[in-house]
Image (cartoon, coloured by chain):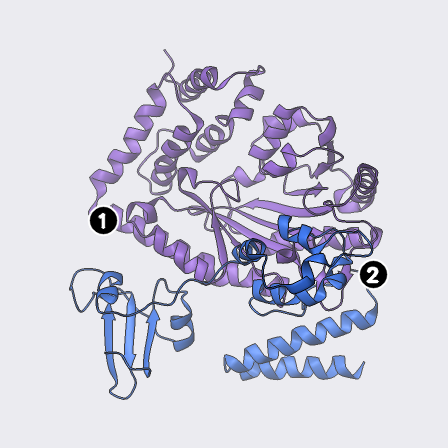
Chain colours: A blue, B purple
Amino acid sequence: MYSSNSRIWVSTFVFSRAERFEGIQVVDMVCQRCQQNKATVHISDLPEKREQHLCDDCAEKVGVIVKQSHHTANEILQQFIKQKTGLGGAGDLACPKCGLTFKEFQLKGLLGCPHDYVAFQSVLSPLIQRAHEGGVHHVGKVPATAEETVKRQTGLLRLRRELQEAIDQENYERAARVRDQIRILELQ
Amino acid sequence: MNLDELTRGTGEWLRGEGPMSDVVVSSRIRLARNLADQPFLTTASESDRAHIYRAVAQAVTSISVSADDLIVDLEQTEPLDRHVLVERHLISRQHAAAEGSRGVTISPRETRAVMINEEDHLRIQGLRSGLQLEALWEEITDVDDGLSRQLAFAFDRQLGFLTACPTNVGTGIRVSVMLHLPALRLTKEIERVARAAKDLRLAVRGLYGEGTEAAGDLYQLSNQTTLGKSEESIIQTFSETIIPNIVGYERAARETLHRHHLSQLDDRVWRAYGVLANARRISSGETQSLLSPIRMGIHMGRFKVFSLKTMHELFLYTQPAHLQKLLNRTLDEDDRAVARADFIRKRLGTAK
Protein backbone atom coordinates (compact mmCIF):
# COMPACT_ATOMS: atom_id res chain seq x y z
CA MET A 1 0.00 0.00 0.00
CA TYR A 2 2.81 2.39 0.82
CA SER A 3 5.72 2.40 -1.58
CA SER A 4 9.29 3.04 -0.67
CA ASN A 5 8.75 6.58 -1.90
CA SER A 6 6.26 7.27 0.86
CA ARG A 7 7.52 9.53 3.55
CA ILE A 8 6.17 8.73 6.94
CA TRP A 9 6.67 10.93 9.90
CA VAL A 10 5.29 11.10 13.36
CA SER A 11 4.27 14.34 15.00
CA THR A 12 4.52 13.09 18.55
CA PHE A 13 5.06 16.68 19.55
CA VAL A 14 6.13 19.84 17.85
CA PHE A 15 9.75 19.11 18.52
CA SER A 16 9.72 15.85 16.56
CA ARG A 17 12.42 15.80 13.91
CA ALA A 18 10.00 15.72 11.03
CA GLU A 19 8.42 19.03 11.84
CA ARG A 20 11.62 20.75 12.62
CA PHE A 21 13.26 19.69 9.43
CA GLU A 22 10.31 19.84 7.06
CA GLY A 23 9.24 23.19 8.43
CA ILE A 24 5.70 21.90 8.75
CA GLN A 25 3.57 22.95 11.66
CA VAL A 26 1.02 20.27 12.36
CA VAL A 27 -1.90 21.76 14.23
CA ASP A 28 -4.39 19.42 15.87
CA MET A 29 -5.51 17.34 12.90
CA VAL A 30 -8.17 14.68 13.25
CA CYS A 31 -7.43 11.16 12.02
CA GLN A 32 -8.81 10.74 8.50
CA ARG A 33 -9.71 7.12 9.11
CA CYS A 34 -11.58 7.05 12.43
CA GLN A 35 -12.43 10.78 12.42
CA GLN A 36 -12.01 10.75 16.19
CA ASN A 37 -8.50 10.70 17.53
CA LYS A 38 -5.77 13.23 17.00
CA ALA A 39 -3.74 12.50 13.86
CA THR A 40 -0.16 11.80 14.82
CA VAL A 41 1.21 9.79 11.90
CA HIS A 42 1.54 11.63 8.62
CA ILE A 43 2.21 9.92 5.31
CA SER A 44 2.90 11.58 2.02
CA ASP A 45 3.35 9.82 -1.32
CA LEU A 46 5.67 12.03 -3.25
CA PRO A 47 4.77 11.02 -6.84
CA GLU A 48 1.04 11.45 -6.31
CA LYS A 49 1.38 14.36 -3.89
CA ARG A 50 -1.06 12.50 -1.69
CA GLU A 51 -1.11 13.00 2.03
CA GLN A 52 -2.69 11.01 4.78
CA HIS A 53 -3.05 11.79 8.46
CA LEU A 54 -3.82 9.03 10.93
CA CYS A 55 -3.91 8.41 14.65
CA ASP A 56 -1.59 5.86 16.29
CA ASP A 57 -4.20 3.07 16.35
CA CYS A 58 -5.32 3.48 12.74
CA ALA A 59 -1.75 3.75 11.51
CA GLU A 60 -1.06 0.39 13.09
CA LYS A 61 -4.25 -1.10 11.61
CA VAL A 62 -3.39 -0.08 8.05
CA GLY A 63 0.08 -1.48 8.49
CA VAL A 64 2.24 1.61 8.75
CA ILE A 65 5.29 0.72 10.72
CA VAL A 66 6.39 3.55 12.90
CA LYS A 67 10.09 3.80 13.50
CA GLN A 68 11.22 2.43 16.84
CA SER A 69 12.46 4.76 19.54
CA HIS A 70 16.18 5.32 19.83
CA HIS A 71 17.98 3.60 22.60
CA THR A 72 19.41 5.84 25.25
CA ALA A 73 23.12 5.74 26.01
CA ASN A 74 22.53 3.77 29.18
CA GLU A 75 20.46 1.16 27.40
CA ILE A 76 23.21 0.74 24.83
CA LEU A 77 25.70 0.23 27.61
CA GLN A 78 23.40 -2.24 29.39
CA GLN A 79 22.89 -4.25 26.19
CA PHE A 80 26.60 -4.25 25.65
CA ILE A 81 27.24 -5.47 29.16
CA LYS A 82 24.67 -8.24 28.80
CA GLN A 83 25.72 -9.58 25.44
CA LYS A 84 29.34 -10.45 26.40
CA THR A 85 29.84 -12.29 23.13
CA GLY A 86 31.46 -11.61 19.82
CA LEU A 87 34.46 -9.95 21.40
CA GLY A 88 36.93 -12.71 20.66
CA GLY A 89 39.77 -12.43 23.12
CA ALA A 90 38.87 -8.87 24.14
CA GLY A 91 37.57 -10.07 27.51
CA ASP A 92 41.11 -10.95 28.53
CA LEU A 93 42.49 -7.49 27.73
CA ALA A 94 43.86 -5.87 30.87
CA CYS A 95 44.94 -2.32 31.60
CA PRO A 96 48.66 -2.23 32.48
CA LYS A 97 48.09 0.69 34.86
CA CYS A 98 45.11 -0.31 37.02
CA GLY A 99 44.92 -4.02 36.19
CA LEU A 100 41.20 -3.94 35.32
CA THR A 101 40.26 -6.53 32.68
CA PHE A 102 37.75 -5.83 29.97
CA LYS A 103 35.59 -8.60 31.40
CA GLU A 104 35.43 -6.73 34.72
CA PHE A 105 34.40 -3.57 32.90
CA GLN A 106 31.60 -5.51 31.23
CA LEU A 107 30.32 -6.67 34.60
CA LYS A 108 29.99 -3.20 36.11
CA GLY A 109 29.99 -0.82 33.17
CA LEU A 110 32.62 1.29 34.95
CA LEU A 111 36.27 1.71 34.01
CA GLY A 112 39.21 1.44 36.39
CA CYS A 113 41.40 4.41 35.45
CA PRO A 114 41.81 7.07 32.74
CA HIS A 115 44.31 4.85 30.91
CA ASP A 116 41.58 2.25 30.22
CA TYR A 117 40.42 4.45 27.36
CA VAL A 118 43.79 3.69 25.70
CA ALA A 119 44.11 0.07 26.83
CA PHE A 120 40.60 -0.90 25.65
CA GLN A 121 40.43 1.50 22.74
CA SER A 122 39.68 -1.09 20.05
CA VAL A 123 36.62 -2.43 21.87
CA LEU A 124 35.50 0.79 23.56
CA SER A 125 35.46 3.02 20.49
CA PRO A 126 32.43 1.43 18.76
CA LEU A 127 30.52 1.46 22.06
CA ILE A 128 31.32 5.13 22.69
CA GLN A 129 30.30 6.05 19.17
CA ARG A 130 26.95 4.27 19.50
CA ALA A 131 26.26 5.73 22.92
CA HIS A 132 26.85 9.28 21.68
CA GLU A 133 24.85 9.38 18.45
CA GLY A 134 28.00 8.86 16.38
CA GLY A 135 30.00 11.49 18.25
CA VAL A 136 33.69 10.59 18.30
CA HIS A 137 35.42 13.89 18.95
CA HIS A 138 35.13 16.21 21.93
CA VAL A 139 34.05 19.71 20.94
CA GLY A 140 33.29 21.16 24.37
CA LYS A 141 35.36 22.96 26.93
CA VAL A 142 38.96 22.14 27.69
CA PRO A 143 40.64 22.44 31.10
CA ALA A 144 41.77 25.99 31.94
CA THR A 145 45.36 24.77 32.03
CA ALA A 146 45.32 22.83 28.73
CA GLU A 147 47.97 23.75 26.19
CA GLU A 148 47.07 26.38 23.64
CA THR A 149 47.22 23.87 20.78
CA VAL A 150 44.56 21.69 22.40
CA LYS A 151 42.34 24.72 22.95
CA ARG A 152 42.79 25.79 19.34
CA GLN A 153 42.08 22.34 17.91
CA THR A 154 38.97 21.87 20.00
CA GLY A 155 37.81 25.37 19.08
CA LEU A 156 38.29 24.63 15.38
CA LEU A 157 36.34 21.41 15.61
CA ARG A 158 33.47 23.18 17.31
CA LEU A 159 33.43 25.99 14.78
CA ARG A 160 33.45 23.59 11.82
CA ARG A 161 30.51 21.80 13.32
CA GLU A 162 28.71 25.09 13.82
CA LEU A 163 29.48 26.03 10.23
CA GLN A 164 27.89 22.80 9.00
CA GLU A 165 24.84 23.42 11.19
CA ALA A 166 24.49 26.96 9.86
CA ILE A 167 24.70 25.71 6.27
CA ASP A 168 22.16 22.94 6.96
CA GLN A 169 19.80 25.55 8.36
CA GLU A 170 20.51 27.84 5.39
CA ASN A 171 21.58 30.52 7.84
CA TYR A 172 24.23 32.01 5.58
CA GLU A 173 24.77 35.11 7.66
CA ARG A 174 25.80 32.97 10.60
CA ALA A 175 27.82 30.68 8.33
CA ALA A 176 29.84 33.65 7.09
CA ARG A 177 30.52 34.78 10.66
CA VAL A 178 31.65 31.31 11.70
CA ARG A 179 33.83 30.99 8.58
CA ASP A 180 35.63 34.23 9.53
CA GLN A 181 36.23 32.91 13.04
CA ILE A 182 37.68 29.71 11.59
CA ARG A 183 40.07 31.70 9.36
CA ILE A 184 41.31 33.75 12.30
CA LEU A 185 41.91 30.62 14.38
CA GLU A 186 43.64 28.82 11.52
CA LEU A 187 46.10 31.70 11.07
CA GLN A 188 47.21 31.58 14.72
CA MET B 1 26.74 27.27 58.48
CA ASN B 2 26.12 23.64 59.44
CA LEU B 3 23.70 20.91 58.42
CA ASP B 4 21.10 21.79 61.04
CA GLU B 5 20.93 25.39 59.86
CA LEU B 6 20.68 24.15 56.30
CA THR B 7 17.68 21.99 57.16
CA ARG B 8 15.74 24.99 58.48
CA GLY B 9 15.39 26.62 55.04
CA THR B 10 13.85 25.17 51.91
CA GLY B 11 16.82 25.82 49.60
CA GLU B 12 16.95 27.74 46.35
CA TRP B 13 15.47 25.11 44.06
CA LEU B 14 12.24 24.94 46.03
CA ARG B 15 11.55 28.67 45.94
CA GLY B 16 9.11 28.05 43.10
CA GLU B 17 10.39 31.05 41.16
CA GLY B 18 12.18 31.60 37.88
CA PRO B 19 11.01 31.37 34.27
CA MET B 20 8.20 28.90 33.48
CA SER B 21 7.96 27.90 37.14
CA ASP B 22 4.29 26.95 36.69
CA VAL B 23 5.64 23.81 34.98
CA VAL B 24 9.42 23.80 35.47
CA VAL B 25 10.21 23.00 39.10
CA SER B 26 13.99 23.13 38.84
CA SER B 27 17.00 23.08 36.54
CA ARG B 28 20.19 21.19 37.21
CA ILE B 29 23.57 20.90 35.49
CA ARG B 30 26.36 18.61 36.60
CA LEU B 31 29.87 18.07 35.31
CA ALA B 32 31.80 14.83 35.85
CA ARG B 33 35.55 15.28 36.44
CA ASN B 34 38.39 13.01 37.53
CA LEU B 35 41.95 13.59 38.66
CA ALA B 36 44.44 12.60 35.96
CA ASP B 37 46.91 10.85 38.25
CA GLN B 38 44.45 8.75 40.27
CA PRO B 39 42.57 5.54 39.48
CA PHE B 40 38.77 5.76 39.10
CA LEU B 41 36.82 4.76 42.19
CA THR B 42 36.16 1.19 41.01
CA THR B 43 39.83 0.32 41.48
CA ALA B 44 40.92 3.01 44.00
CA SER B 45 42.20 1.82 47.37
CA GLU B 46 40.93 3.42 50.58
CA SER B 47 44.12 5.48 50.78
CA ASP B 48 43.62 6.67 47.17
CA ARG B 49 40.07 7.67 48.09
CA ALA B 50 41.23 9.54 51.18
CA HIS B 51 43.87 11.34 49.13
CA ILE B 52 41.33 12.34 46.44
CA TYR B 53 38.86 13.51 49.08
CA ARG B 54 41.43 15.77 50.76
CA ALA B 55 42.78 17.16 47.49
CA VAL B 56 39.34 18.05 46.12
CA ALA B 57 37.95 19.45 49.38
CA GLN B 58 41.03 21.65 49.71
CA ALA B 59 40.78 22.85 46.10
CA VAL B 60 37.10 23.78 46.50
CA THR B 61 37.78 25.99 49.53
CA SER B 62 40.83 27.58 47.91
CA ILE B 63 38.94 29.13 44.99
CA SER B 64 37.16 32.37 45.72
CA VAL B 65 33.69 31.45 44.39
CA SER B 66 33.38 28.55 46.77
CA ALA B 67 35.49 29.70 49.72
CA ASP B 68 32.41 29.81 51.99
CA ASP B 69 31.07 26.41 51.03
CA LEU B 70 30.11 23.95 53.74
CA ILE B 71 32.21 20.80 53.54
CA VAL B 72 30.41 17.66 54.67
CA ASP B 73 32.50 14.57 55.32
CA LEU B 74 29.88 11.91 54.60
CA GLU B 75 31.88 9.15 56.24
CA GLN B 76 31.47 11.03 59.54
CA THR B 77 27.81 11.95 58.93
CA GLU B 78 24.81 10.19 60.47
CA PRO B 79 22.55 8.23 58.07
CA LEU B 80 19.60 10.55 58.84
CA ASP B 81 21.60 13.64 57.86
CA ARG B 82 22.80 11.93 54.69
CA HIS B 83 19.19 11.18 53.86
CA VAL B 84 18.32 14.84 54.41
CA LEU B 85 20.91 15.75 51.77
CA VAL B 86 19.33 13.27 49.34
CA GLU B 87 15.89 14.81 49.91
CA ARG B 88 17.38 18.23 49.23
CA HIS B 89 18.86 16.90 45.97
CA LEU B 90 22.40 17.78 47.07
CA ILE B 91 23.72 14.22 46.90
CA SER B 92 22.56 11.05 45.14
CA ARG B 93 21.09 8.04 46.92
CA GLN B 94 24.15 6.04 45.92
CA HIS B 95 26.44 8.63 47.45
CA ALA B 96 24.49 8.53 50.72
CA ALA B 97 24.57 4.74 50.87
CA ALA B 98 28.21 4.21 49.81
CA GLU B 99 31.15 3.57 52.13
CA GLY B 100 34.63 4.99 52.51
CA SER B 101 36.09 8.49 52.11
CA ARG B 102 33.58 10.69 50.36
CA GLY B 103 31.82 13.97 50.83
CA VAL B 104 30.05 16.96 49.43
CA THR B 105 30.69 20.69 49.44
CA ILE B 106 27.57 22.89 49.51
CA SER B 107 27.34 26.58 48.67
CA PRO B 108 25.52 28.84 51.17
CA ARG B 109 22.35 29.18 49.05
CA GLU B 110 22.49 25.51 47.99
CA THR B 111 22.73 26.48 44.32
CA ARG B 112 26.00 24.57 44.02
CA ALA B 113 27.34 21.30 45.36
CA VAL B 114 30.42 19.26 44.56
CA MET B 115 30.11 15.56 45.31
CA ILE B 116 33.51 14.04 46.02
CA ASN B 117 34.16 10.35 45.30
CA GLU B 118 30.76 9.48 43.92
CA GLU B 119 30.95 7.57 40.60
CA ASP B 120 33.60 10.09 39.48
CA HIS B 121 36.10 11.92 41.66
CA LEU B 122 34.12 15.14 41.25
CA ARG B 123 30.54 15.82 40.32
CA ILE B 124 30.19 19.58 40.14
CA GLN B 125 26.52 20.47 40.15
CA GLY B 126 24.27 23.50 40.10
CA LEU B 127 20.60 23.58 41.05
CA ARG B 128 18.04 26.37 40.73
CA SER B 129 14.28 26.81 40.60
CA GLY B 130 12.50 27.35 37.28
CA LEU B 131 14.20 27.22 33.90
CA GLN B 132 17.56 28.90 34.52
CA LEU B 133 20.08 26.80 32.63
CA GLU B 134 22.21 29.63 31.23
CA ALA B 135 22.70 31.29 34.62
CA LEU B 136 23.49 27.89 36.13
CA TRP B 137 26.01 27.13 33.43
CA GLU B 138 27.86 30.40 34.09
CA GLU B 139 28.09 29.57 37.76
CA ILE B 140 29.18 25.96 37.24
CA THR B 141 31.70 26.62 34.49
CA ASP B 142 33.38 29.23 36.74
CA VAL B 143 33.81 26.68 39.50
CA ASP B 144 35.07 24.14 36.97
CA ASP B 145 37.65 26.63 35.63
CA GLY B 146 38.78 27.50 39.14
CA LEU B 147 39.13 23.85 40.10
CA SER B 148 40.95 22.94 36.89
CA ARG B 149 43.68 25.45 37.82
CA GLN B 150 44.18 23.64 41.13
CA LEU B 151 43.69 20.04 40.02
CA ALA B 152 44.91 18.28 36.86
CA PHE B 153 41.77 16.71 35.36
CA ALA B 154 41.89 13.53 33.25
CA PHE B 155 41.48 14.92 29.75
CA ASP B 156 42.15 13.60 26.27
CA ARG B 157 42.16 15.82 23.21
CA GLN B 158 40.01 13.40 21.23
CA LEU B 159 37.68 12.10 23.94
CA GLY B 160 37.53 15.16 26.19
CA PHE B 161 37.06 14.68 29.95
CA LEU B 162 37.56 11.03 30.86
CA THR B 163 34.91 9.56 33.13
CA ALA B 164 34.43 6.26 34.94
CA CYS B 165 31.44 5.43 32.75
CA PRO B 166 32.00 5.82 28.99
CA THR B 167 28.46 7.19 28.62
CA ASN B 168 29.63 10.42 30.31
CA VAL B 169 32.88 10.91 28.41
CA GLY B 170 33.49 14.17 26.51
CA THR B 171 31.87 17.14 28.20
CA GLY B 172 30.83 15.06 31.21
CA ILE B 173 27.74 17.24 31.30
CA ARG B 174 24.29 16.20 32.40
CA VAL B 175 21.55 18.77 32.03
CA SER B 176 18.36 17.83 33.90
CA VAL B 177 15.12 19.70 34.14
CA MET B 178 12.40 18.68 36.58
CA LEU B 179 8.91 19.20 35.21
CA HIS B 180 5.52 19.06 36.85
CA LEU B 181 3.15 17.56 34.27
CA PRO B 182 -0.15 16.71 35.99
CA ALA B 183 -2.40 17.88 33.15
CA LEU B 184 -0.55 15.85 30.51
CA ARG B 185 -1.04 12.81 32.70
CA LEU B 186 -4.76 13.54 33.19
CA THR B 187 -5.27 14.02 29.44
CA LYS B 188 -3.27 10.79 28.93
CA GLU B 189 -0.66 12.46 26.76
CA ILE B 190 2.27 11.86 29.07
CA GLU B 191 3.30 8.65 27.29
CA ARG B 192 3.67 10.60 24.07
CA VAL B 193 5.92 13.14 25.75
CA ALA B 194 8.05 10.35 27.13
CA ARG B 195 8.32 8.72 23.71
CA ALA B 196 9.13 12.00 21.95
CA ALA B 197 11.79 12.73 24.56
CA LYS B 198 13.29 9.31 24.01
CA ASP B 199 13.39 9.95 20.28
CA LEU B 200 15.56 12.94 21.04
CA ARG B 201 17.85 10.71 23.08
CA LEU B 202 16.76 12.12 26.38
CA ALA B 203 16.28 10.15 29.56
CA VAL B 204 12.98 10.52 31.41
CA ARG B 205 13.01 9.65 35.09
CA GLY B 206 11.10 10.16 38.32
CA LEU B 207 11.85 12.61 41.11
CA TYR B 208 14.97 11.02 42.56
CA GLY B 209 16.74 10.05 39.35
CA GLU B 210 17.55 6.66 37.97
CA GLY B 211 15.04 3.89 38.59
CA THR B 212 12.51 5.96 40.52
CA GLU B 213 8.81 6.41 39.84
CA ALA B 214 7.32 9.72 38.83
CA ALA B 215 5.80 10.53 42.24
CA GLY B 216 3.60 13.60 42.28
CA ASP B 217 3.68 13.94 38.47
CA LEU B 218 7.28 15.12 38.61
CA TYR B 219 9.46 14.09 35.71
CA GLN B 220 13.15 14.63 35.21
CA LEU B 221 14.37 15.04 31.65
CA SER B 222 18.09 14.82 30.93
CA ASN B 223 20.54 14.55 28.06
CA GLN B 224 22.38 11.30 27.39
CA THR B 225 24.83 12.34 24.70
CA THR B 226 27.98 13.97 26.05
CA LEU B 227 30.49 13.55 23.21
CA GLY B 228 30.51 15.45 19.90
CA LYS B 229 28.35 18.36 21.13
CA SER B 230 29.41 21.43 23.05
CA GLU B 231 28.00 22.24 26.48
CA GLU B 232 26.37 25.39 25.10
CA SER B 233 24.59 23.57 22.29
CA ILE B 234 23.24 20.91 24.67
CA ILE B 235 21.99 23.61 27.04
CA GLN B 236 20.53 25.66 24.21
CA THR B 237 18.52 22.69 22.89
CA PHE B 238 16.96 22.33 26.31
CA SER B 239 16.21 25.95 27.02
CA GLU B 240 15.11 27.02 23.56
CA THR B 241 13.43 23.94 22.09
CA ILE B 242 12.69 20.96 24.27
CA ILE B 243 11.51 22.55 27.50
CA PRO B 244 9.46 25.44 26.02
CA ASN B 245 7.65 22.90 23.84
CA ILE B 246 6.76 20.56 26.67
CA VAL B 247 5.76 23.53 28.83
CA GLY B 248 3.53 24.67 25.96
CA TYR B 249 1.83 21.28 25.84
CA GLU B 250 1.33 21.11 29.59
CA ARG B 251 -0.16 24.61 29.57
CA ALA B 252 -2.43 23.68 26.66
CA ALA B 253 -3.56 20.56 28.53
CA ARG B 254 -4.29 22.69 31.63
CA GLU B 255 -6.25 25.07 29.42
CA THR B 256 -8.30 22.14 28.09
CA LEU B 257 -9.04 20.98 31.62
CA HIS B 258 -10.02 24.50 32.59
CA ARG B 259 -12.30 24.98 29.63
CA HIS B 260 -13.97 21.58 29.34
CA HIS B 261 -13.56 19.81 32.68
CA LEU B 262 -13.62 22.57 35.27
CA SER B 263 -15.72 20.74 37.86
CA GLN B 264 -13.53 17.64 37.63
CA LEU B 265 -10.41 19.78 37.96
CA ASP B 266 -11.72 21.64 41.01
CA ASP B 267 -12.98 18.40 42.51
CA ARG B 268 -9.54 16.86 42.23
CA VAL B 269 -7.82 19.89 43.79
CA TRP B 270 -10.28 20.26 46.66
CA ARG B 271 -10.48 16.55 47.44
CA ALA B 272 -6.69 16.58 47.72
CA TYR B 273 -6.94 19.48 50.16
CA GLY B 274 -9.68 17.67 52.05
CA VAL B 275 -7.50 14.63 52.64
CA LEU B 276 -4.38 16.64 53.54
CA ALA B 277 -6.33 18.81 55.98
CA ASN B 278 -8.02 15.89 57.72
CA ALA B 279 -5.93 12.74 57.43
CA ARG B 280 -4.73 11.14 60.67
CA ARG B 281 -2.12 8.97 58.97
CA ILE B 282 -0.46 9.61 55.65
CA SER B 283 2.55 8.25 53.74
CA SER B 284 5.03 10.51 51.98
CA GLY B 285 4.03 9.00 48.63
CA GLU B 286 0.39 9.88 49.17
CA THR B 287 1.36 13.37 50.34
CA GLN B 288 3.32 13.97 47.15
CA SER B 289 0.50 12.77 44.94
CA LEU B 290 -2.00 15.00 46.79
CA LEU B 291 0.27 18.03 46.57
CA SER B 292 0.42 17.59 42.79
CA PRO B 293 -3.14 18.75 41.97
CA ILE B 294 -2.77 21.48 44.61
CA ARG B 295 0.38 22.81 42.98
CA MET B 296 -1.46 22.88 39.66
CA GLY B 297 -4.55 24.43 41.28
CA ILE B 298 -2.48 27.25 42.79
CA HIS B 299 -0.82 28.01 39.44
CA MET B 300 -4.19 27.98 37.68
CA GLY B 301 -5.78 30.29 40.23
CA ARG B 302 -8.26 27.60 41.35
CA PHE B 303 -6.88 27.19 44.87
CA LYS B 304 -6.04 30.00 47.30
CA VAL B 305 -6.31 28.42 50.74
CA PHE B 306 -2.54 28.36 51.08
CA SER B 307 0.38 29.72 49.08
CA LEU B 308 3.02 28.12 46.89
CA LYS B 309 5.52 28.74 49.68
CA THR B 310 3.44 26.61 52.08
CA MET B 311 3.04 23.98 49.38
CA HIS B 312 6.84 23.80 49.01
CA GLU B 313 7.35 23.56 52.75
CA LEU B 314 4.89 20.68 52.93
CA PHE B 315 6.60 19.08 49.97
CA LEU B 316 10.03 19.19 51.58
CA TYR B 317 9.27 18.59 55.28
CA THR B 318 6.89 15.67 54.83
CA GLN B 319 9.67 13.55 53.36
CA PRO B 320 10.91 10.92 55.85
CA ALA B 321 14.30 12.38 56.80
CA HIS B 322 13.16 16.00 56.95
CA LEU B 323 10.15 15.05 59.08
CA GLN B 324 12.36 13.30 61.62
CA LYS B 325 14.88 16.13 61.56
CA LEU B 326 12.12 18.66 62.14
CA LEU B 327 10.61 16.72 65.03
CA ASN B 328 14.09 15.94 66.32
CA ARG B 329 13.50 12.24 66.87
CA THR B 330 13.81 9.01 64.92
CA LEU B 331 10.50 7.45 63.95
CA ASP B 332 9.66 4.20 62.18
CA GLU B 333 7.42 4.23 59.13
CA ASP B 334 4.28 3.62 61.17
CA ASP B 335 4.93 6.51 63.59
CA ARG B 336 5.97 8.73 60.71
CA ALA B 337 2.57 8.34 59.04
CA VAL B 338 0.89 9.74 62.17
CA ALA B 339 3.52 12.45 62.76
CA ARG B 340 3.30 13.53 59.12
CA ALA B 341 -0.48 13.88 59.22
CA ASP B 342 -0.18 15.89 62.47
CA PHE B 343 2.46 18.14 60.97
CA ILE B 344 0.35 18.84 57.88
CA ARG B 345 -2.78 19.64 59.88
CA LYS B 346 -0.83 21.96 62.18
CA ARG B 347 0.76 23.72 59.24
CA LEU B 348 -2.65 24.13 57.57
CA GLY B 349 -4.31 25.24 60.78
CA THR B 350 -6.80 22.38 60.72
CA ALA B 351 -5.48 20.47 63.76
CA LYS B 352 -8.12 20.01 66.41
Report the residue at 79% width, 60% height from top. Answer: A144
The amino acid on which the numbered mark 2 sits, given as a three-letter code, is: Thr
> Taking the image as drawn, is residue A174 in sight?
no
Chain of the residue under label 1: B
> Residue B184 versus residue B48: which sits nearer the camera?
B48
Report the residue at 49% width, 57% height from top. Answer: B202
Q: Position of residue A132 (x, y in %)?
A: 58, 64
Q: Are marks 2 and 1 in contact (CB under 8 Å)?
A: no
Q: Is residue B50 above or below residue B245?
A: above
Chain of the residue under label 2: A
> Residue A102 versus residue B69: which sits nearer the camera?
A102
Q: Is residue B66 above or below residue B232?
A: above
Q: Is residue B10 above or below residue A176?
A: above
Residue indicated by mark 2: A145
Q: CA distance from mark 2 to mark 1?
A: 58 Å
Residue indicated by mark 1: B259
Task: For mark 1, give the secondary structure.
Answer: helix
> Taking the image as drawn, is residue A154 in sight?
yes
Say whether residue B12 is left or right of residue B193. right
